Amino acid sequence: MYYFGEYRVALDDKGRMRIPNKIKSQLGNGSVTICAGTDGALFLMTEEEFTGRIAELAEETPFADFGKQNALRMFSSTVFSPEEDAQGRFVLPSKLREYAKINKKVVFLGAMTRVEIWSEEAYDKTYGTDKLDINGAVRALGI
């Protein structure tokens, strides 16, 4: 599955949010996993996608490689499977909100093989319309 597009949502007064309908329909009816990602974003994947990616990493990391074991511990401590209420809302754990600097407004970004969740402020600072450089992106990708 490939994900595309940008969707903006806001946390409600109780800190709950929803996965945008377009993304939710692409994810299907199964469980999803959210974890800390790169550059201050969170990654959202189906549980199946996440399990496939993490299984290789976990199996290939030697117990004696303390650096990689510590990295696995740090990463795995951020993994979260949201449980939605009847309206499809869930509360993002404070550890993930702090990591992504999410206060109120959120951007869900389809990033090909995963969905990224950004604070609106961080996303706009890095990828906002005034930063849009399609020519540079095409060159970087070699398209």
Image: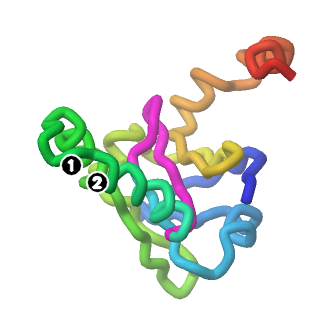
> What residue appears at the point 69 percent right and 25 percent down from the top-left corner?
128
Residue 69 placement, left or right of 75: left
> Which region shows up in magenta?
36-47
Location of residue 12 in the rendering, given as x and y in whole percent from the top left corner: 50, 62
> What residue appears at the point 74 percent right and 72 percent down from the top-left corner?
25
> What residue appears at the point 42 percent right and 54 percent down from the top-left corner?
56
Q: Is residue 38 magenta?
A: yes
Which quadrant is the N terminus positioned in? bottom right
Above/below status of 24 relative to 62 = below
Above/below status of 76 relative to 74 = below
| Number of marks in picture | 2
Residue 4 placement, left or right of 96: right
Residue 47 placement, left or right of 67: right
**Residue that numbered label 2 is attached to:** 76
Q: Mark on residue 73?
A: 1
Q: Quadrant of residue 19?
A: bottom right
Is 59 or 33 nearer to us in this picture? 59
